[in-house]
Amino acid sequence: GQSLEQPSEVTAVEGAIVQINCTYQTSGFYGLSWYQQHDGGAPTFLSYNGLDGLEETGRFSSFLSRSDSYGYLLLQELQMKDSASYFCAVRPWGRYGGATNKLIFGTGTLLAVQP
Amino acid sequence: GAVVSQHPSWVICKSGTSVKIECRSLDFQATTMFWYRQFPKQSLMLMATSNEGSKATYEQGVEKDKFLINHASLTLSTLTVTSAHPEDSSFYICSAPRVSSTDTQYFGPGTRLTVL
């Protein structure tokens, strides 16, 4: 099975840098993704790590360490519009070894950006 | 623009009635779609995988007779909540994967179901 834990809430101020962690216990997965969801809206894709290491996409970066069962999302130059929920998610292996397309989501982190 | 649509965006129904939610991929074909349920302030929980031309695959603990899924075409999947009860009130979201080098999935805008 899959279990992905995140801090429930994080608060930061505009312009700051914040890191949202995702620790997991899984039976194996294809890659780790990060999604943003504003209240009442659909999740939107932010970043993906297929391999260990750091991936940078503008103000957002994501990191994965499979040996440590750990990943994080780094948000820089925080803006008020970044206030949202953030979810890590994995794409688990299928029964016969291939990667499935379904996503198993982490517990989610509510980020509040203050002026 | 949106690549996955859902209809309706919100619905209120009486207990015991059935509600159908549609999920459409707008500019691509999706042989597989996914249905998630999200309760307030909680994460998205995968309910089932909708497969075009075959039966849906349900996650453990999800009642297949209560949540009927039909993948009628390569661009349409429907979720029917049968005999809805107040505890079924939730945000239902569908998604469809697109072939890419990343894990990108495109999510519909969601359907807010309220059962009175």
Image: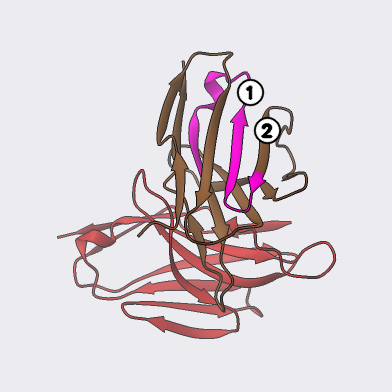
Chain colours: A red, B brown
Position above or below: B42 against A13: above
Name the residue type under label 1.
Thr
Q: What residue appears at the point 52 percent right and 20 percent down from the top-left corner?
A: B86
Is residue B109 shown in magenta? no
Please indicate whether residue A17 sits to the left or right of residue B23 in the image. Answer: left
Q: Chain of mark 2?
A: B
Q: Which residues are magenta?
A: B72-93
Q: Secondary structure at mark 1?
A: loop
Q: Position of residue A20 (x, y in %)?
A: 42, 66
Q: Chain of mark 1?
A: B
Dot label at residue B82: 1
Q: Residues within 10 Å of mark 1 (few under 14, many from 20)?
A: some
Name the residue type under label 2.
Leu
Q: Position of residue B28 (x, y in %)?
A: 53, 62
Q: Are the residues at dot 1 and dot 2 in contact (C-beta closer than 8 Å)?
A: yes
Q: What residue appears at the point 64 percent right and 65 percent down from the top-left corner?
A: A91
Number of numbered discs visible in the structure rendering: 2
| Res A9 → quadrant | bottom left
Position above or below: A21 against B114: below
Q: What residue appears at the point 44 percent right and 52 percent down from the top-left corner?
A: A8
Please indicate whether residue A33 sits to the left or right of residue A19 in the image. Answer: right
Dot label at residue A19: none
Q: Position of residue A82 (x, y in %)?
A: 28, 62
Please indicate whether residue A39 sits to the left or right of residue A99 in the image. Answer: left
- Taking the image as drawn, is residue B74 in sight? yes
Dot label at residue B68: 2
| Res A61 → quadrant | bottom left
